Image (spheres, grey):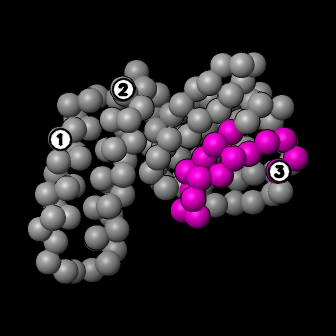
Amino acid sequence: MIKLEIVTPERRLVDVEADSVTVPTVRGEIGLLKSHAPMISAIKPGILAYTSKGNSERFVVSGGFVEVSSDKVSVLADVAEQASEVNVSDAQAAKQQAEKELAGWSGGPEEEFEQVKERLELAEARLKIAR
């Protein structure tokens, strides 16, 4: 078992003993088990999943960091939501707006382009988890 904490600036969502954890990072999705090598990575928009006592839970996460030690995973996220918290119509509107911005992209700062892509990824993750 590995201790999992998911915390946002507003609240602590999860504090459990988990069998396994999957986290979307900027380097790709990583699977974590007890005795994983220590690491710190930035989180990218996506779905964080964990299994505890045979039950699986999923959250949409975006922004922030994951810190891993041999027996603990700490997720400090800007956004973390359970499926029941997702407003599907808002997520669909955000997805459509981001797609429209990307389709009409005519250049500009790379940072702005990446922010729009992250908004699109977050909206898609929200829609995926809500289904």
The percent coordinates of residue 53 (x first, y second) are: 75, 19
The percent coordinates of residue 95 (x first, y second) are: 23, 47
Q: Which of the two labelled residues, at mark 1 and mark 3, occupies the earlier sequence position?
A: 3
- Of residue 90 and residue 52, the one placed in the foreground of this image is 52
Instruction: Tell whether position 48 is magenta.
Output: no
Q: Is residue 70 left or right of residue 50?
A: right
Please give the range of residues in magenta: 21-36
Q: Are marks 2 and 3 in contact (CB under 8 Å)?
A: no
Question: Is 19 rendered above or below residue 61?
Answer: above
Q: Is residue 84 visible?
A: yes
Question: Is 131 rendered above or below residue 5?
Answer: above
Q: Residue at x 65, y 52 (%)?
A: 30
Q: Residue at x 28, y 71 (%)?
A: 112
User: Which residue carries the number 2 mark?
Assistant: 131
Q: Residue at x 83, y 56 (%)?
A: 37
Name the amino acid type tagged 2: Arg
Q: Which of the two labelled residues, at mark 2 and mark 1, occupies the earlier sequence position?
A: 1
The percent coordinates of residue 88 (x first, y second) are: 26, 29
Q: In the rendered image, which quarter contains the C terminus? A: top left
User: Which residue carries the number 3 mark?
Assistant: 36
- Of residue 68 and residue 13, the one placed in the foreground of this image is 68
Query: Is disc 2 placed on a helix, strand or loop?
Result: loop
Instruction: Tell whether position 33 is magenta.
Output: yes
Name the amino acid type tagged 3: His
User: Which residue carries the number 1 mark?
Assistant: 93
Q: Residues within 10 Å of mark 1 (few under 14, many from 20)?
A: few
**Residue 52 falls in image quadrant:** top right
